[in-house]
Image (spheres, rainbow, N blue to C red):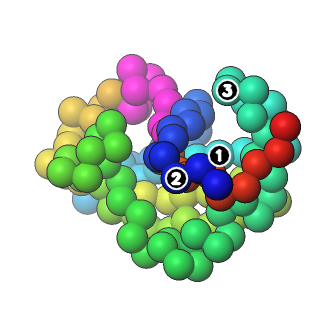
Amino acid sequence: MINKLQYKSIELKQETTSRLPDGRLKVVAYAAVFGNIDSYNDIIVKGAFANSLKKEGKRVAVCWQHDMRKPIGKLISIKEDDTGLLVEFLISRSEEDVAVKIEEGIISEMSIGYSTVAFDY
């Protein structure tokens, strides 16, 4: 068992963002994808997040650089589907610079922090 917090990044695709009438940026994107070899040479299997989501799903935070002292948005939903870990969140109006940078493609990735419970080589 590995308890150390690890990080994994994934491309944030432009088509996953939209502006709400109140001006906030809504992001719907995969935070992880199942079954492919990622940039870390890892393969995440379906079900990898299931137990954590049951136990901790409501505690997931949208933070800048994984810093819990710097929340930038509100999680709307998080779930596993056949493709991967699908998240939906809103960027706070107080973080307009982050929202614009996402729209302009300057911020082009998102990442998750996780602890590996089981693995195989």
Q: Residues within 10 Å of mark 3 (few under 14, many from 20)?
A: few
Q: Position of residue 18 (x, y in %)?
A: 45, 47
SS category of the residue bearing label 3: loop
Kindly give the residue lying farthest to the bottom in the view shown: 54
Mark 3 or mark 1, whichever is nearer to me: 3
Query: As shown in the figure, which amino acid type bears the numbered disc 2?
Result: Asn
Kindly give the residue lying farthest to the top in the view shown: 106
Q: Position of residue 37 (x, y in %)?
A: 80, 31
- The answer to whether residue 21 is visible is no
> Which comes before the other along the chain, label 3 or label 1?
1
Calculate the distance from the C-alpha at mark 2 to the C-alpha at mark 3. 18 Å
- The answer to whether residue 95 is visible is yes
Q: Residues within 10 Å of mark 1 (few under 14, many from 20)?
A: many
Q: Residues within 10 Å of mark 2 (few under 14, many from 20)?
A: few
Q: Which mark is residue 32?
A: 1
Please name the residue that numbered disc 2 is placed on: 3
Mark 2 or mark 3, whichever is nearer to me: 2
Residue sitting nearer the eye, 56 or 101: 56
